[in-house]
Image (cartoon, helix red, strand yellow):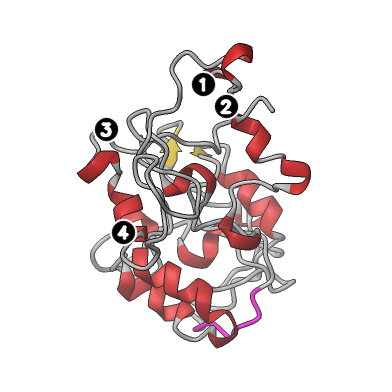
Amino acid sequence: MAAVDVLTNNEHDFAGRCELCHTTADVTPGGPASLREASVIAGQCQQCHRVQPGTSHPVGMIVKAKLPEIFPLDESGRMTCLTCHRAHQPAKGEPLPSFLRRGTAGIELCSQCHAQAHEVAKRDQHALGFAAAHDKAEPATGTTVMGLDERSMACMSCHDDFGIGGQGGSNHPIGVPYPVGAGPRRDYHPKSRLPPAIRLFDGNLGCETCHSLYSNMDNYLVMSNRGSALCLTCHDK
């Protein structure tokens, strides 16, 4: 399952329907995009593509850095799905993968914007380190060393003060299984009650159980921890 699942066989045929995404029906190919509000465009995309929570680059936020002209923002300067993706394939030449505005995904695409956003350098380091705008909605089965998933192993290349398998470290342990028999008497909520944002990796806790590279919250949390809300999502008390 991908982070953005295709729900229909839509082939992006928007002939005569420019106003769905643009503020004017008279759109010049290759000219100014005149994009409608980010929320409107996201609503159009999500009619056919299901975006999994916490697994994709956020949209709808104001972009302070100056981006290359090929990556348009809406009229309020907010990022939309169409900032990185086209709604149409180019009329000439080879089709672009995933309707990307540039033909190469990964670091080459991400660095077009993030390398210029110096005021958010820390976030850029994470974005460029993983170079993926859409993560897998469900982590691949199979863990690596000591019960850790591949993404957590990548995190530990820079962050290493974790209690792997519950041993040592000053942070929450990772690489340990979520209690199978969790319930009121075990001080954990059952796995069936965990929201989609709380992800397990082959049943184990990983860095991205509580964090997401795509989060706009402090410390990349998948949800607010105000009043210990994040903690109490798993812990009964």
How far is disc 2 from disc 4 in space, using C-alphas? 25 Å
First of labels 2, 4 by sequence position: 4
Say if residue 10 shows up in the picture: no
Compared with 16, 149 (above or below) is above
Q: Nearer the viewer, residue 210 or 83?
A: 210
Residue type, label 3: Thr
Q: Secondary structure at mark 2?
A: loop
Residue tagged by mark 4? Answer: 154
How far is disc 1 from disc 4 in space, using C-alphas? 25 Å
First of labels 3, 2 by sequence position: 3
Answer few, some or many: residues within 10 Å of disc 1's Cα (few below 14, many 20 plus, some between 14 and 19): some
- Secondary structure of the magenta portion, mostly? loop
The spot of residue 153 in percent (x, y) is: 29, 54
How far is disc 3 from disc 2 in space, using C-alphas? 19 Å
Q: Which stretch is magenta?
A: 63-68
Residue 191, labelled with which disc? Answer: 1
The residue sitting at 52% across, 17% down in the picture is 182
Residue lying furthest right in this view?
A: 227
Q: Are circles 2 and 4 on residues that touch, CB within 8 Å?
A: no
- Of the 4 image quadrants, the one containing the N terminus is top left
Answer few, some or many: residues within 10 Å of disc 2's Cα (few below 14, many 20 plus, some between 14 and 19): few
Q: Quarter of the image holding residue 33?
A: bottom right
The residue sitting at 58% across, 23% down in the picture is 188
How far is disc 1 from disc 2 in space, using C-alphas? 5 Å
Q: Secondary structure at mark 4?
A: helix
First of labels 1, 4 by sequence position: 4
Q: Secondary structure at mark 3?
A: loop
Answer few, some or many: residues within 10 Å of disc 3's Cα (few below 14, many 20 plus, some between 14 and 19): few
Compared with 227, 218 (above or below) is below
Residue 151, labelled with which disc? Answer: none
Residue type, label 2: Leu
Residue type, label 4: Ala
